[in-house]
Amino acid sequence: MAMLFEKRYLPDYKYEETYDPIKKKIITTATYIGPEFVYADAPKARSTAAWLFGGVLLSWIVFLGAMAVLNAASTWAWVILPYICLLIPLWYITNRLFTAMRVEEPMNHRDSDRVTLFQYGTIPGMILTGISLAGEIVSLLIMPEKMLWGDWVFIGCAAAVMAYFVALHLMKKHLETRPITHG
């Protein structure tokens, strides 16, 4: 059995090897011995995670809706490429918020990091959305004759996704964890 842990979490585990005479191989089992974490304010963290998860699902709909309408933005690489790259931060945040809703307390070190480090997706999301919006607005000012009605939908959808990323970044303090002190 291969261990799928990152190196930083290896010291949190104690490994024991036993020989299985029936299968004729050595079996390694890992037991968690590292620090345990809980939410700093558990009820608020759970409700915040649920609301933010609903928001990220809505952001997926808005994200896809911006590309579903006929617009000139889809033909300009400086607008559409950063917007398409939003798939990565949106997926990252969706994964992290799903973990935040489903994780059992007390958490191990890895789960605590997965819950609290989702803001690594918010900054790239804000940057990519900002580049896309800036490109669309500059295109609007330079080439207004090429703009279609769908470009206004694109601007509105991109602004909504940007607002979600900003709100998510501001709400990160509600999902903080703290280590359990024994003794």
Image: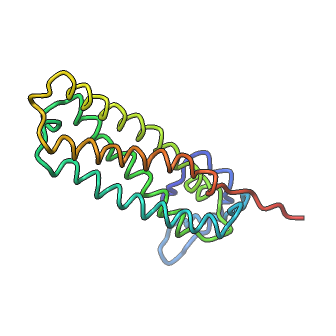
Frontmost residue, 157 versus 13: 157
Residue 44 or residue 116, whichever sits in front:
44
Is 145 on the left-hand or right-hand side of 155?
Answer: left
Q: Residue at horizontal 9%, vertical 28%? A: 145
Residue 75, horizontal then vertical, whole percent: 12, 34
Pinpoint residue 29: horizontal percent, then vertical percent: 60, 66
Residue 67, given in percent of the width and then of the height, sits at 19, 48
User: 39 or 112, which lies in front?
Assistant: 39
- Quarter of the image where one finds residue 112: bottom right
How did the renderer colour the structure? rainbow
Query: Residue 152: which quarter of the image?
Result: top left
Q: Residue at x 50, y 50 (%)?
A: 168
Q: Is residue 42 left or right of residue 59?
A: right
Question: In this rendering, is residue 80 above or below 150?
Answer: above
Image-quadrant location for residue 55: bottom left
- Residue closest to the far right: 183
Number of disc labels: 0
Q: Residue shown at 65%/61% (left/top)? A: 108
Quarter in which the C terminus is drawn: bottom right
Q: Residue furthest bottom?
A: 22
105 or 2, nearer to the observer: 105
The spot of residue 54 in percent (x, y) is 42, 64
* Picture residue at 55% right of the left edge, 65% below the top: 26
